[in-house]
Amino acid sequence: MTFAMVFPVSTHNYEIRYWMGSAGIDPDQDVRLIVIPPPQMVANLKAGNIVGYCVGEPWNERAVEAGIGRTLITNYEIWNNNPEKVFGVNLEWHEKNPRTHQALIMALLEATQWMDQPKNRMEVVSLIAQKSYVNAPDEVVKMSMTGTFKYAKDEEPRPLPDFNVFYRYAANFPWLSHAAWFISQMYRWGQLEQPANILQTAGSIYRPDLYRQAAKALGVPYPTIDVKKEGINAKPWTLKEATSPIAMGPDRFFDGGVFDPAKSGEYVTGFAVKNLKVTPEALLKANS
């Protein structure tokens, strides 16, 4: 069986692998995973080149509306309020343009606050549905954007209010624990071959300090910690380690897993389904 995702180091790759691995399926041995650009997913599904795919919206709803596919699970359900898109620059550019970088982060924070207001969501839909962006009908794009999701053509849309979160729940904050989780999956599936300290590596890439500068300039609350355990909150909760309390959403993994960034080595080596290119001993030592 051939499945598609959008890129070997995409969130979609790690999500479909995590989903399969939790069921005891080895995505490197039991099925075939290939890369297909998002706009070509539906056509390849219709042609029978693949039996399924993991991709962002609106390509799932397009297959549903066309009557050629159904959604089995969303990434929100795999990992509640998981991180998705990022805004990243290289270090050299940042060092040459620190004020421009801060202004960009501030602009993104202001834009995401606006996008998270329900009254503005249909304007967001009309913008991104355009041919120069995702090139999909408004009716398809609006499903996830307005807090509903249609899993199958013969079903009514279901409420999924947190499918798209742009600002709420400190959604923009670059949690080192998020980066560490993705690095752990890179090790799990053999993409990284040299043992390293996962949390330290995450800290060299994600920059909470830059986020805090921008948030402080805008006068919006921000976390005062860089790391948290992932998968421990099944219900809404409040982050108190912040400049003022921040309402947070669930962060549960669908299989009940918990990721403690301080125990990244144990986490990676503890999976029943994995394809490590480093010895468990070396990874545990690097993360002790």
Image (spheres, rainbow, N blue to C red):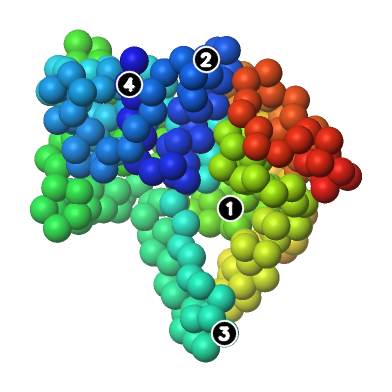
Q: How far from the left and from the top, in percent, is residue 196?
A: 75, 51
Q: How far from the left and from the top, in percent, is residue 13?
A: 45, 36
User: Nearer the observer, disc 2 or disc 3?
Assistant: 2
Quick one: 177 or 9, which is closer to the camera? 9
Q: Is residue 257 above or below residue 130?
A: above
* Residue 177 visible: yes
Residue to which mark 3 is pinned: 95
Rendered image quadrant of residue 111:
bottom left
Is 4 positioned to the left or the right of 178 in the image?
left
User: Nearer the observer, disc 1 or disc 3?
Assistant: 3
**Mark 2 and mark 3 residues within 8 Å of each other at the beta carbon:** no
User: Nearer the observer, disc 2 or disc 1?
Assistant: 2
Residue count near mark 4 (Cα–Cα under 10 Å), binned few <14, some 14–19, many ≥20: some
| Real-space Cα separation, disc 4 to disc 2, in angstroms | 13 Å
| Real-space Cα separation, disc 2 to disc 3, in angstroms | 44 Å
Residue to which mark 2 is pinned: 25
**Of callouts 4 and 2, the N-terminal one:** 4
Quadrant for the C terminus in the image: top right
Circle 2 sits in a helix, a strand or a loop, which is it? loop
Is 147 positioned to the left or the right of 168 in the image?
left
**Mark 3 and mark 4 residues within 8 Å of each other at the beta carbon:** no
